[in-house]
Image (tube, rainbow, N blue to C red):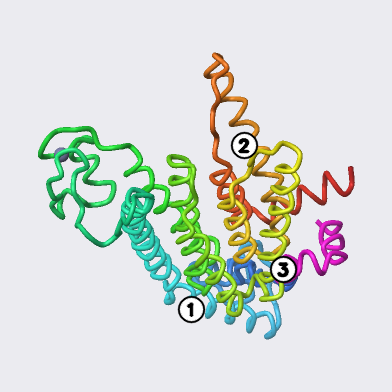
Amino acid sequence: MIFFQVKLGQWPIVTGNFVEYYSRTFRGLATGSCVPAVSAWPGKTLFRDNIVAGRPNGSSANGVTGRNEKFKEQAFASERLLKKSRAVSGKEIRRMVEDLLSFFITLFGALIGSFLNVVIVRLPEEGGSVVFPPSHCPACKKAIAWYDNIPLASFLFLRGRCRQCGVRISWRYPLVEGVMALISLALYQHFGLTILYPIYFVFCAALLAVIFIDFQHQIIPDVISLPGIVIGFGLSFVNPFVTWQNAGLGILFGGGSFYLLALVYYLFTKREGMGGGDIKLLAMIGAFLGWQSLPFVVFGSSLLGTVAGVGAMVKQRKGGKTVIPYGPFLAIAALLYLFFRREILFLFIRYVLHG
Ligand SMILES: [Zn+2]
């Protein structure tokens, strides 16, 4: 661990935020602020045993007597601490509040997931509006009542079928709701109710919509990625993890490097390998996560994409051309970086820098 800390210290530019995070954690451990004070008090049991047994303070069952006043004072102090810890069962209250908060935050995620489903269906449509008309069954076109439109619960209750016509409802609906609910909870666990929660909630919601839209239609809508770049850059001014300089470089490198790659690919093959949508998506990722995220996002997404590509080829051996969009893998790699960047950095330093 010490090695790790020293190593991190030598990476101040690349790892700025991690250095701060780790030094804070280690300082906390060093000062013992994580260790409960009461249970570590040595005089506690002796003093309480004496009260029960009716012995004078400072004596003990095996006959050791004559402790001085200082010891007595210590024992009193420990008893006071113990009482205080009992009176403030605030810890329990706090845990209850946190559980309740977790519940509502998960529910909020599911609700936004429900909205994302509408975005995923209607955005790729020509002139599609996400507000009008209200939710309706894609088969029988009948409006869906509010009680049949409750995230996750309604799908289970209706056993995945439309109440009116009985047609199967896509598994995508509960999946998006469930994933967004989990992402919301994970963000809360990871960042607490800080400014980072809303910033990365917006980011994750955009990525989730991109994953499903690109997977189905092989497009990444500009209405998601272009505002995403602007919003990500704007939020970098209040984002304690990413400075506006790093976000700016993220947009530049994210958009630029991919543009170059696509250009080279086109010059050699006269075919378009990567869509312009991927370029804008990577610029958006750079805006939200900083340029430091780009090596992992590019490398990780190509790895994921290759694995998926090989899987698809094995599955349909006939040699037909499979189109696997790249955007979903970029988005998944960005999500992995968001939640596991410390672990990723650790593995990178441990195995790549040190062989
Ligand atoms: Zn129907």
The reply to whether discs 1 and 2 touch (Cβ–Cβ < 8 Å) is no
State the mark number for residue 249. Answer: 3
Q: Quadrant of residue 128?
A: bottom left
Q: Which residue is mark 1?
A: 84
- On the image, the x and y values in percent for residue 165 come to 12, 35
Choose between 190 and 312: the one closer to the eye.
312
- Mark 3–mark 2 distance (CA, rounded to whole Å): 25 Å
Between discs 1 and 3, the one toward the N terminus = 1
- Mark 1–mark 2 distance (CA, rounded to whole Å): 57 Å
Question: Residue drawn at (71%, 82%), measured in percent from left and top?
Answer: 68
- On the image, the x and y values in percent for residue 121 come to 33, 48
Question: Which amino acid does the dot numbered 2 rest on?
Answer: Gly
Q: Specify whether tag 1 is near ligand 1 (CB below 8 Å).
A: no
Question: Which amino acid does the dot numbered 1 rest on?
Answer: Lys
Q: Magenta part of the protein: which range?
A: 1-24
Q: Quadrant of residue 223?
A: bottom left
